[in-house]
Image (cartoon, rainbow, N blue to C red):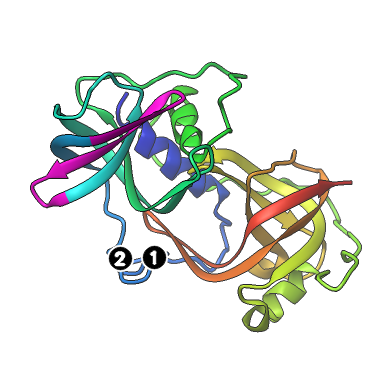
Amino acid sequence: MSNLFLIAATLAIAACTRPAAPTRIAQQSTSIPAAEAAPAATTLDGEVTEKIDAAQYSYLKLQTGSGEVWAAVPRTDKEVGDKVKVASAVWMTGFTSRSMNRSWDKIAFGTLEEGAPAVLPAGHPAIGSDPAQGMFAQAAAGKAATAQHPAPAAAADLGNIKVARASGPQGRTVVEVWSKRASLKDQKVAVRGKVVKATDGVMGKNWLHVKDGTGEGAQADLTVASDDTAAVGSTVVITGVVHLDKDLGAGYHYDLIVEDATLKHE
């Protein structure tokens, strides 16, 4: 059960990766400058020096043999001074808890070796209220019940997509975002399109692919990360920031992604 956190996050992100997208496995860089690449699942041993309980999980600051680290685990009764072992720890960089209005440059998600994952039932009001819960809820739902990597999910075949360009000064087509990506780097854009793929609640975000009928191949759709979501086939206007050369850790890299996006359904 403890391995489900790693499996859920890895497989669901893989399912959102375009088959033809210009991605590559990151070797050294991460989204945090000068930080080391996110390692594979590991085990952390240490003494709890600080603890923060939030909803169905606990944040633990650990004093380990290699220094202080933070870990997030399903809710535990362990206290400051206790020695714990966090199994199947998966590292995330640049993580923010909205409910606590606090950020960590680097934090490990895992489960205590002697504990069991907290299970949030479907429809639980806490699900989705904080980025950490995406990982715990995903594992609890059992959406990745096998350790084998399936082939990346194909985008839905919605026929001939033809969607008008978003209005306003930020309005762009999909192909314009790709072709003008250098000048649009770190800029906000608005794109109207149809959702052809959606994976929700992974690493605290919902992952969408949007097409408007422009562009070809890998440049025919946009990968979008958002707190909002939409059903496949929906027409939406996404407004978010263009980021280039984005490393999400765990070996997933995007040459172009629109992040912090809001969705307007039409």
Question: Which quarter shows the N terminus?
Answer: top left
Does residue 32 appear left or right of residue 237 in this picture? left
Amino acid, disc 1: Ile
Where is residue 167? Give x, y as percent: 91, 66
* Residue 150 seen by the camera: no
- Residue bearing mark 1: 32
Residue 52 belongs to the span the image colors magenta:
yes
**What amino acid is labelled 2 in the image?**
Ala
Counting from the top left corner in percent of width and height, residue 204 is at 52, 42
- Give the class, few, some or many, for how many residues have Cα within 10 Å of label 1's Cα (few <14, many ≥20): some
Q: Is residue 156 above or below residue 212?
A: above
**72 horizontally vs 18: left or right:** left
Task: Identify which residue is drawn at 80% across, 43% down.
Answer: 233
Q: Residues within 10 Å of mark 2 (few under 14, many from 20)?
A: few
Percent position (x, y) of residue 60?
Answer: 28, 36
The image shows residue 197, relative to residue 121, as above or below, that is below
Question: Who's the residue at 31% across and 32% down the image?
Answer: 3
Q: Residue at x 74, y 41 (%)?
A: 230
Q: Which residues are magenta?
A: 50-67
Along the viewing direction, whichever of 187 and 211 lies nearer the viewer = 187
Q: Nearer the viewer, residue 77 or 19?
A: 77
Image: 94 above or below 140: below
Q: Who is closer to the viewer here, 187 or 88?
A: 187
**Chief SS of the magenta region:** strand
Mark 1 touching mark 2, by CB under 8 A? yes
The verdict on residue 189 being magenta is no
Q: Does 17 appear above or below 2?
A: below
Q: Give how far apart the Cα atoms at labels 1 and 2 are.
A: 6 Å
Residue 201, image quadrant: top right
Residue at mark 2:
35
Residue, x 53% and y 16% (percent of image)? 121
Kind of element beneath mark 1: loop
